[in-house]
Image (cartoon, rainbow, N blue to C red):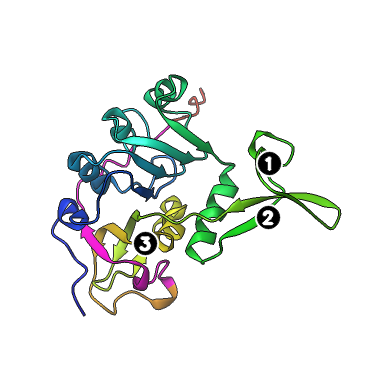
C-alpha cells in the first residue's frame, strides 16, 4: 500500500486546501490540538474557513492563530470563552458562530462519521438553541432535530501511530479527536511517536487506519494549559 507518512505538515496538506472549505480540528481545550497542522493552515493562507472545533483556541495559539490572520469565516463550537479576538470579531459581526451544547456537538460529529444525517435530542429544547429547528414528540417529550456534521478535512492529534495510520490517543486528547477522524472527507493526523507495524495492540487502537489518509510525526509540542489552577499550600 502507498505510504501515508509525509515529511511535514505543509506536505501533508498539499493539494487538500481551498478557500471556503470546512475543517474539523480535534482537541479539548488546549489538550490534544493538532498544533503543527494548524500552523501549516495559517502559513498556507487559505481563507473563508468554517472551523468545527470544541473551542476556538486562545489568543495566539490553536485556532486562535487562524482568527488572528482572519482566515476563519465561521466557527461551529461549544466553548469559546478563552479567546478575546474571537469575542471581538463576533461582537463586531465579522465572524459567524453556530453555537452548540457540547454533547450535541460531539454527537453531531459522531453521527456525521457514522453516515447518520440527523438525530433528535432533548438538549436545548425551549432555548435559543432550538430556534428554527424541527420539533417532534417522542413518549410525551419534545425533541429537536440536529444534523450530523461532515467536513472537507479533519485534522487530528494522536499520541502514537503505526505506518498504516492506526492511532492511539492519550488521556484527554481522546476527546473529539477520534470522532473527528471519522467525519472528515480526508483525515490528516499528526502524532508524537511512530511505531512499527504490528506493535500496537489491536484492542488498544482508538482510530483504525482506514479513517486516516495522511500522517506526520511532530516534535516540540507546547501542550499549554488553558487555565492553571493550584491549591494554596497548607501551613504547618
Q: Earlier in the sequence, mark 3 or mark 2?
A: 2
- Bounds of the magenta span? 204-227
Q: Position of residue 25 (x, y in %)?
A: 37, 48
Q: Position of residue 53 (x, y in %)?
A: 43, 44
Q: Position of residue 100 (x, y in %)?
A: 56, 41
Q: Dot 2: few (<14), some (14–19), or many (≥20) neighbours within 10 Å?
A: some
Task: Answer yes or no: is residue 227 visible.
Answer: no
- For residue 185, which numbered disc appears in the image? 3
Q: Dot 3: few (<14), some (14–19), or many (≥20) neighbours within 10 Å?
A: some
Q: Is 192 included in the stretch rendered in magenta? A: no
Does residue 162 sit above or below 102 in this rendering? below
**Main secondary structure along the magenta-highlighted residues:** loop
Q: Nearer the viewer, residue 122 or 194?
A: 122
Q: Is 224 included in the stretch rendered in magenta? A: yes
Q: Nearer the viewer, residue 184 or 136?
A: 136
Q: Quadrant of residue 133?
A: top right
Query: Circle 2 sits on which residue?
Result: 120
User: On the rendered image, what quadrant is the N terminus found in?
Assistant: bottom left
Query: Circle 1 sits on which residue?
Result: 124
Does residue 60 sit above or below 27 in this rendering? above
Amino acid at each position: 500500500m502507498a505510504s501515508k507518512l509525509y515529511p511535514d505538515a505543509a506536505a501533508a496538506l498539499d493539494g487538500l486546501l481551498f478557500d471556503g472549505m470546512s475543517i474539523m480540528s480535534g482537541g479539548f481545550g488546549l489538550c490534544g490540538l493538532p498544533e503543527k497542522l494548524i500552523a501549516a493552515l495559517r502559513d498556507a493562507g487559505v481563507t473563508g474557513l468554517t472551523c468545527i472545533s470544541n473551542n476556538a483556541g486562545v489568543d495566539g495559539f490553536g485556532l486562535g492563530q487562524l482568527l488572528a490572520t482572519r482566515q476563519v469565516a465561521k466557527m461551529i463550537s461549544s466553548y469559546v470563552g478563552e479567546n478575546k479576538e474571537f469575542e471581538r470579531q463576533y461582537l463586531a459581526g465579522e465572524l459567524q458562530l453556530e453555537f452548540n451544547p457540547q454533547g450535541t456537538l460531539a454527537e453531531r460529529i459522531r453521527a456525521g462519521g457514522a453516515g447518520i444525517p440527523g438525530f433528535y435530542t432533548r438538549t436545548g429544547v425551549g432555548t435559543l438553541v432550538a430556534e428554527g429547528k424541527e420539533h417532534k414528540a417522542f413518549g410525551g417529550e419534545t425533541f429537536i432535530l440536529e444534523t450530523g456534521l461532515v467536513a472537507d478535512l479533519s485534522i487530528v492529534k494522536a499520541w502514537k501511530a503505526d505506518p498504516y495510520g492506526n492511532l492511539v490517543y492519550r488521556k484527554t486528547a481522546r476527546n473529539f479527536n477520534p470522532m473527528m477522524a471519522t467525519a472528515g472527507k480526508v483525515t490528516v493526523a499528526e502524532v508524537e511517536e511512530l511505531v512499527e507495524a504490528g506493535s500496537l495492540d489491536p484492542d488498544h487502537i482508538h482510530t483504525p487506519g482506514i479513517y486516516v489518509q495522511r500522517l506526520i510525526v511532530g516534535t516540540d509540542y507546547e501542550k499549554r494549559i488553558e487555565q492553571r489552577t493550584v491549591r494554596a499550600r497548607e501551613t504547618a
